Image (spheres, helix red, strand yellow):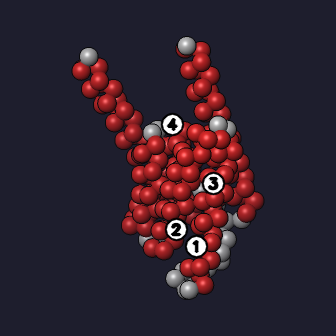
Amino acid sequence: MKNLSNNFDRRTFIQTALFNILAFGFVFAIPYVSKYTGIPFYVIEPMRLAVILAIAHMNRWNAYILALVLPLFMFLTAMHPSVYKTLLLGLELLLNAGLFYFLVKKIKNAFFTMLISIVAGKMIYYGLKYLFIDIQLIEGPLVSTPIMYQLLTTFVYSGYIYLILRLRESRKSKEV
């Protein structure tokens, strides 16, 4: 029995490590691919996408870790975004994941739960960004990614979470 447990832990570790390597590589590559192709792939919010995929396919702690570490990783490797925007992004993504896990037990609708958690995270992000601009910690426009793209990704990511969790529930009910 212990051998089976060790194989499961090893399998989970390998899956998590592979997922994280792909997430970090994807997030790291997006700015360069956007620059060289002229296609603004950053509008898909690659860090949020990685956290959403972790919520859908990995465990809670991996989503939290990615939410905190991806912005820091980008700052340390590409010096982008600035240190204050890095803090804002980490807080927004952590709030997104944490609020989702908290609310999904209460609301029982993954689409609305994700929608609420993304919007709440964005509200905190933009509120703090406005403050940071006002006290001159950061420069630039308050909104750099057009709102329409943000709305589109919010609905697509919320729909994705809904479908994945619905499929998971459907499989569980068929097993019983």
The residue singled out by tag 4 in the image is: 57
**Mark 3–mark 2 CB contact (< 8 Å):** no
Label 1, secondary structure: give it: helix
Residue type indicated by callout 4: His
Q: Position of residue 18 (x, y in %)?
A: 39, 40
Label 1 crowd bin: few (<14), some (14–19), many (20+), radius 10 Å: some
| Residue 30 in view here | no
- Using the numbered discs, state the Cα–Cα distance from disc 1 to disc 3 in whole angstroms: 15 Å
Closer to the chain start, of discs 1 and 3, is 3
Q: Is residue 163 above or below residue 99?
A: above
Q: Position of residue 57 (x, y in %)?
A: 51, 36
The residue singled out by tag 3 in the image is: 118
Closer to the chain start, of discs 4 and 2, is 4
Identify the residue shown where x is 43% and y is 67%: 75
| Residue 88 in view here | yes
Label 4, secondary structure: give it: helix
The residue singled out by tag 2 in the image is: 88
Q: Closer to us: mark 3 or mark 4?
A: 3
Closer to the chain start, of discs 2 and 1, is 2
151 left or right, relative to 14: right
Quarter of the image with the N terminus in it: top left
The residue singled out by tag 1 in the image is: 128
- Using the numbered discs, state the Cα–Cα distance from disc 3 to disc 2 in whole angstroms: 14 Å
- Using the numbered discs, state the Cα–Cα distance from disc 2 to disc 1 in whole angstroms: 7 Å
Q: Is residue 29 above or below residue 85?
A: above
Residue type indicated by callout 2: Leu
